[in-house]
Image (cartoon, rainbow, N blue to C red):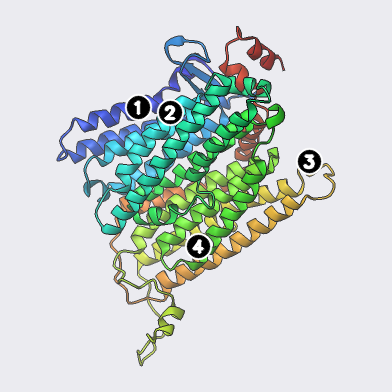
Amino acid sequence: MSRFADHLLAAPVVVPLLAGALMLLLNERRRAWKAAISLASTFALVVVAIVILNAIDSPPNRAGSAGVYRLGAWPAPFAIVLVADRLAALMLLLTSVLASASLLFSLARWHRVGAHFHSLFQFLLMGLDGAFLTGDLFNLFVFFELLLAASYGLALHGSGALRVRAGLHYIAINLAASLLFLVGVSLIYGVTGTLNMADLAIRIPAVAPENRPLLEAGAGILGIVFLLKAGMWPLCFWLPTTYAAVAAPVAAIFAIMTKVGVYIVLRLWLLLFGVEAGASTQLGGDWLLFGGMATVAFGVIGTLASQDLARLTAFSVLVSSGTVLAAIGMGQVGVTTGALFYLVSSTLGLGALFLLVELTERGREPGADVLAVTREAYGEEDVDGEEEIGVAIPATMALLGLAFIGCALVVSGLPPLSGFIAKFALLSAALNPLGTNASSGPISGASWALLAMLILSGLATLIAMVRAGIRTFWAAPDRTIPRVRVIEMAPVGILIILCGILTIQAGPIMRYMRDAAEMLHTPRSYIGDVLPPSVPEARGADRS
């Protein structure tokens, strides 16, 4: 990366910090000014993320070097470092795009139903971007707490007893996770004497055998924290109720928050406990694989049991997270490549679906989502004597229905949108890990389990989505037609169009994902970029 691009790494943290602080100084009645500042900041983050991604993926930089920004020009591991490799740049762009869509949607009315919405939104972006860029565990804790503090306010944004109850539950769970975070970091620091991620990757293989149980205990505690945030079963009991209760634009941006936990697990597991971690190599890999599959099973059961579209979408978040975690646990470059493509596709699709839920639910009567079989069980039957032949579908409902079909295709993994490409990439890599031109021998049981999980989860999600679509758009023709503004429908359409672009540009995008996966599985270049040449271990890592 160029020197300018290295300095640009601070922008994803500084820009939302300044925007959020500035809006705190403005009176709440100046909502137009706040909206303009927030939009300018969020769109600027999209531009910055694109510049960083292009700088990292430019032809001279294809070898795999990462951009590093050292605050105060102090050398690592003593400096606060921001590191952008291909994975971090990808997450920055995904976050800024999803945030732009959520913010546009909120300008219709949601930013007016509570105080300091825009400041909280910007502080959340600051925490998310900082978590993706940071190069040490202590600052990961700082950014983690910052994004959680902002998410507490956003979870409670608006009114309603259900939202307050779910928000308080969410706060209590994450406060406990923060305490565990400190315990885990303390154990790791006590054993290794450092919290810089690259420095930890060098020191962990040399940890004395008598200290290794403490190291692995600290790593296990951190794993619980991040897997709780990712929504792995059985730590996911808080997620469906919280995500279904929060405001629509908040739920959409929360779709990326589960991926923060997935990102950190992917980053730390391959960096600290990869093939060169000595006795701790592949620590917890089986837990990721089977825990991810259990999460998918739990999410599938939840989607089939949900009688509310918001809860169905929330359980689909668990299916998405579980799929990526199980793929990470496979420990194969090809499967990780497909998992990264799936992560982007599912996050965009779920974000669009969360926004769409609020639009489709307007004007519905309480209890309208109860299944027909449930109504029959309680003796509630259709008593209309005259059957209508042909029902005119208003243009608004037709547009919402088409958007719902697009979201359903992405989330369930059906062609022609990006969800199918992602699942196909996962399956092809799992069944033939050495590539299409090589014989990989007998297929492992884990690969067959992943195959069954992807097919069955897609089928179950499709059944749940079709049932919800029929109930919402077809079975209630006399429902009140919702009033939908362009500023609400546009973000949904943009996210679905982006899923279409992922399909059309699947070749170059998949190449980028493969390069990102290879950097993750062979982190020597990352270590060499972060640590200065004066450190003997860094020189050795760089030579390798």
Residue type beneath disc 3: Leu
Query: In the rendered view, does 352 fall on the left or right side of 536?
Result: left
Asked if residue 92 shows in the view, the reply is yes
Q: Earlier in the sequence, mark 3 or mark 2?
A: 2
Relative to 190, does residue 334 appear above or below in the rendering? below
Q: For the N terminus, which image quadrant? A: top right
Residue type beneath disc 1: Val
Q: Earlier in the sequence, mark 1 or mark 3?
A: 1
Query: Residue 434 bears which disc, if any?
Result: 3
CB under 8 Å between discs 1 and 3: no
Residue type beneath disc 4: Gly
Tell me the distance, in whole angstroms, between the alpha carbons under discs 4 and 3: 35 Å
Relative to 265, does residue 248 appear above or below in the rendering? below
Tell me the distance, in whole angstroms, between the alpha carbons under discs 1 and 4: 39 Å
State the image coordinates of residue 294 (x, y, percent, origin top left): 60, 55
What is the crowding at mark 3: few (fewer than 14 residues within 10 Å), some, or many (at least 20)?
some
Q: Earlier in the sequence, mark 1 or mark 2?
A: 1
State the image coordinates of residue 54 (x, y, percent, origin top left): 53, 27
Q: Which residue is mark 4?
A: 302
Residue at left 43%, top 75%?
A: 371
Q: Which residue is mark 2?
A: 48
Query: In the rendered view, does 40 fall on the left or right side of 225?
Result: left
Q: Earlier in the sequence, mark 2 or mark 4?
A: 2
